[in-house]
């Protein structure tokens, strides 16, 4: 599909024209588009356990399932996590030259049981006081089993720092998941915003946690080299009192650490970070969020301290979408919307990414905050202060595509398509960013939707 951005590539005049056209479109609610593209509706099938994408690295007690995430509030720390089959030190050696590791850090180790499964030894080590915009090389393990990787820290936080994020949700570990993942590997994304539902281990009897291990190996070609910013989804809950498992989020909490304490959160399920010119807030659809609850109190405080002169872009990640015109999971995010939408409008959140629905949808800038029970103002309206809502739960998981949209398409919905894919958010300056959604298109990555995002603080 040719997009409006394709037509202006290479032309300064064209880009200026595009900016003006989309500025006007940002203030007008044109008829939405339901894509005519029809994806083959064959079942999504998990990769077999003996897939080469699930290979265990060679050597005695070799580190595996390596993944990193931001380890502090502003981007000068990285949490390195990995698993070994046997006990070992949680030590990372690192430096700016390959093979010359003049720094080391030691962290902690944990493991867990889930029904009849016992995890390997899960290591989490934080590398602190890193230099901004610097490539570091790091090594895990010893001798012939040692493994080496690298990552690049973000630029120092500031208002005009360009940066590129990838966005994926509801990935799973099917052949379609692999397609999505490999397309993302070839993108220019520097940090991935993951909007929940990782392994889908809970789709198996007794939440077969071996599928957590295979998922960790599948995504390691990216997660070991760039931070993935984690959001918990419903498939991470794994509350199974029928088999004696009564601690929600147990496997997820042991495997995926996040820097929640750095933003004064009391839970790993909601937290915030700054990265380049962006303030990112991660929320939990599946934790209490009513008035006076810990998440409600924390979000009220966090939104109030966002400084748009330092981080002009404000992004929210939450698994269940607030606006969704798909039949699947329709209205599930409604109580969350009622609770927080007025705050998102008040603080001019730029964009909210969600998953949960296994399709793609982008909204216009709309709000529905006027309704007060006794009036009739209960229809979403255009609102320059409001976020764009993007549902991107189309990673390719075993549950398959959500191919049934409600009809007619609601006025707030700008574009929707029942296909698998990923997205890129390319921030250019404090005023504008380019957003692309890439359809997998049966093996060929294609731009299915594009949008010029105008910053709410500087452009509204």
Image (cartoon, rainbow, N blue to C red):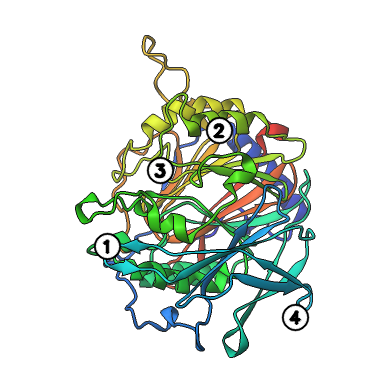
Q: Position of residue 409 (x, y in %)?
A: 36, 39
| SS label for mark 2 | helix
Can residue 362 be seen from the camera position used here?
yes
- Residue 373, compared with residue 10, is above or below; it is above
Q: Nearer the viewer, mark 4 or mark 3?
A: 4
- Residue 435, compared with residue 123, is above or below; it is above
Mark 3 vs 2, N-terminal side: 2
Q: Nearer the viewer, mark 3 or mark 2?
A: 2
Q: Residues within 10 Å of mark 3 (few under 14, many from 20)?
A: many
The residue at which mark 2 appears reads as 298
- In-image side of 351 versus 8 (left or right): left
Q: CA distance from mark 2 to mark 4?
A: 41 Å
Can residue 399 be seen from the camera position used here?
no
Residue occupying the far left of the picture:
242
| Mark 1–mark 4 CB contact (< 8 Å) | no
| Mark 1–mark 3 CB contact (< 8 Å) | no
| Mark 2–mark 1 CB contact (< 8 Å) | no
Mark 4 vs 3, N-terminal side: 4
Residue drawn at x 78%, y 73% as measured from the top left: 96
The residue at which mark 1 appears reads as 115
The residue nearer to you, when weighing 139 against 357, is 139
Residue occupying the far top of the picture:
374
The residue at which mark 4 appears reads as 98
Q: Nearer the viewer, mark 2 or mark 1?
A: 1
Q: Residues within 10 Å of mark 4 (few under 14, many from 20)?
A: some
- In-image side of 99 versus 439 (left or right): right
Q: Position of residue 159 (x, y in %)?
A: 77, 43
The label on residue 345 is none
The label on residue 320 is 3
Residue drawn at x 41%, y 34% as measured from the top left: 288
Q: Position of residue 187 (x, y in %)?
A: 60, 67
| SS label for mark 3 | loop
């Amino acid at each position: 599909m040719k997009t409006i951005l394709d037509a202006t590539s290479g032309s300064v005049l064209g880009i200026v024209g595009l900016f003006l056209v989309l500025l006007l479109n940002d203030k007008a609610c044109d008829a939405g588009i339901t894509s005519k593209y029809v994806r083959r509706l064959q079942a999504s099938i998990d990769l077999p356990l003996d897939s080469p994408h699930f290979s265990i690295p060679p050597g005695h007690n070799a580190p595996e399932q390596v993944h990193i995430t931001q380890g502090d509030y502003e981007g000068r720390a990285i949490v390195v996590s990995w698993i070994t089959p046997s006990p070992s030190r949680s030590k990372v050696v690192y430096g700016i030259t390959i093979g010359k590791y003049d720094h080391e850090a030691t962290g902690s180790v944990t493991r867990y049981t889930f029904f009849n499964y016992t995890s390997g030894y899960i290591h989490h080590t934080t590398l602190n006081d890193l230099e901004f915009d610097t490539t570091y090389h790091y090594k895990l393990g010893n001798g012939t089993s040692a493994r080496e990787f690298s990552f690049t820290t973000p630029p120092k936080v500031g208002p005009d720092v360009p940066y590129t994020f990838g966005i994926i949700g509801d990935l799973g570990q099917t052949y379609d998941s692999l397609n999505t993942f490999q397309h993302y590997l070839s993108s220019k994304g520097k940090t991935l915003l993951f909007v929940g539902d990782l392994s889908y281990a809970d789709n198996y009897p007794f939440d077969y946690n071996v599928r957590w291990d295979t998922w960790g190996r599948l995504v390691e070609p990216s997660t070991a080299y760039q931070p993935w910013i984690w959001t918990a989804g419903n498939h991470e809950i794994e509350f199974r009192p029928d088999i004696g498992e009564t601690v929600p989020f147990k496997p997820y909490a042991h495997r995926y650490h996040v820097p929640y304490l750095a933003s004064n959160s009391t839970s790993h399920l909601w937290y915030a970070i700054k990265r380049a010119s962006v303030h990112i807030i991660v929320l939990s659809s599946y934790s209490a969020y009513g008035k006076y609850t810990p998440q409600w109190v924390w979000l009220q405080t966090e939104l109030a301290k966002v400084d748009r002169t330092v981080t002009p872009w404000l992004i929210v990640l939450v698994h269940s979408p607030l606006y969704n015109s798909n039949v699947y999971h329709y209205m599930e995010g409604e109580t969350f919307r009622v609770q927080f939408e007025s705050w998102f409008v008040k603080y001019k959140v730029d964009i909210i990414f969600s998953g949960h629905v296994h399709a793609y949808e982008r909204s216009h800038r709309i709000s529905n905050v006027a309704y007060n029970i006794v009036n009739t103002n209960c229809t979403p309206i255009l609102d320059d202060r409001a976020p764009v809502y993007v549902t991107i739960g189309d990673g390719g998981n075993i549950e398959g595509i959500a191919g049934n949209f409600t009809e007619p398409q609601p006025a707030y919905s700008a574009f929707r398509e029942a296909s698998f894919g990923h997205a890129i958010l390319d921030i250019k300056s404090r005023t504008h960013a380019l957003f692309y959604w890439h359809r997998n298109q049966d093996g060929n990555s294609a731009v299915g939707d594009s949008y010029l995002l105008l910053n709410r603080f500087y452009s509204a």
